[in-house]
């Protein structure tokens, strides 16, 4: 039986690129340290990022919104 594949979706608000990096790094650390999950790093499987909004909405709100999609799978026991 193969590993169950999924994507983890994270939505975050950011003020600059360090916020996105901090959350992405923290999420990767959390995945690696869980008992049941691991990153799904097969060829062609990579994190995807989607910025929601526009430069105008960022300026009006004072922050942006970023969605992060990270491929994960169950750890083999």
Image (tube, rainbow, N blue to C red):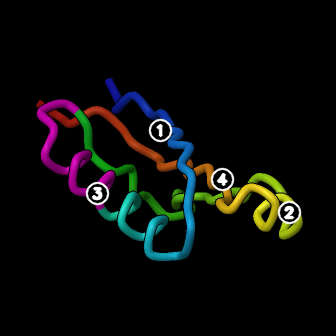
Reading the image, the residue beneath label 1 is 8
Query: In the displayed structure, would residue 23 be above or below residue 17?
Result: above
- Indicate left or right for 5 with 63 as reference: left
The residue that appears at 39% across and 50% down in the rendered structure is 40
Find residue 25 and report its horizontal and vertical position in percent: 32, 64
Q: Is residue 5 left or right of residue 52?
A: left
In three-dimensional space, the C-alpha distance between marks 2 and 1, rounded to whole angstroms, equals 24 Å
Circle nearer the N terminus (3, 2):
3
Q: CA distance from mark 3 to mark 2?
A: 26 Å
Magenta part, dominant SS: helix
Question: Which residue carries the number 3 mark?
Answer: 26
Of badges 4 and 3, the one in the foreground is: 4
Magenta stretch in the rendered image: 26-36
Residue depicted at 48% across the width and 33% down the height: 6
Q: Nearer the viewer, residue 4 or 1?
A: 4
Element assignment for label 2: loop
Q: Position of residue 39 (x, y in %)?
A: 33, 51
Earlier sequence position, callout 3 versus callout 1: 1
First reached walking from the N terminus: tag 4 or tag 1: 1
Read off the residue under disc 2: 54
Name the residue carrying label 4: 65
Q: In whole angstroms, how far apart are the C-alphas of marks 3 and 1?
A: 13 Å
How packed mark 4 is, by other alpha carbons closer than 10 Å (few <14, some 14-19, many 20 or more), is some
The residue nearer to you, when weighing 76 against 61, is: 61
In the rendered image of this protein, does residue 50 appear above or below residue 22? above
């Amino acid at each position: 039986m193969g590993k169950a594949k999924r994507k983890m979706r994270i939505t975050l608000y950011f003020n600059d690129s360090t916020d996105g990096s901090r959350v992405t790094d923290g999420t990767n650390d959390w995945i690696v340290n869980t008992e049941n999950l691991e990153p799904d790093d097969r060829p062609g499987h990579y994190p995807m990022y989607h910025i929601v909004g526009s430069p105008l909405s960022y300026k009006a709100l004072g922050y942006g919104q970023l969605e992060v999609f990270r491929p994960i799978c169950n750890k083999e026991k």
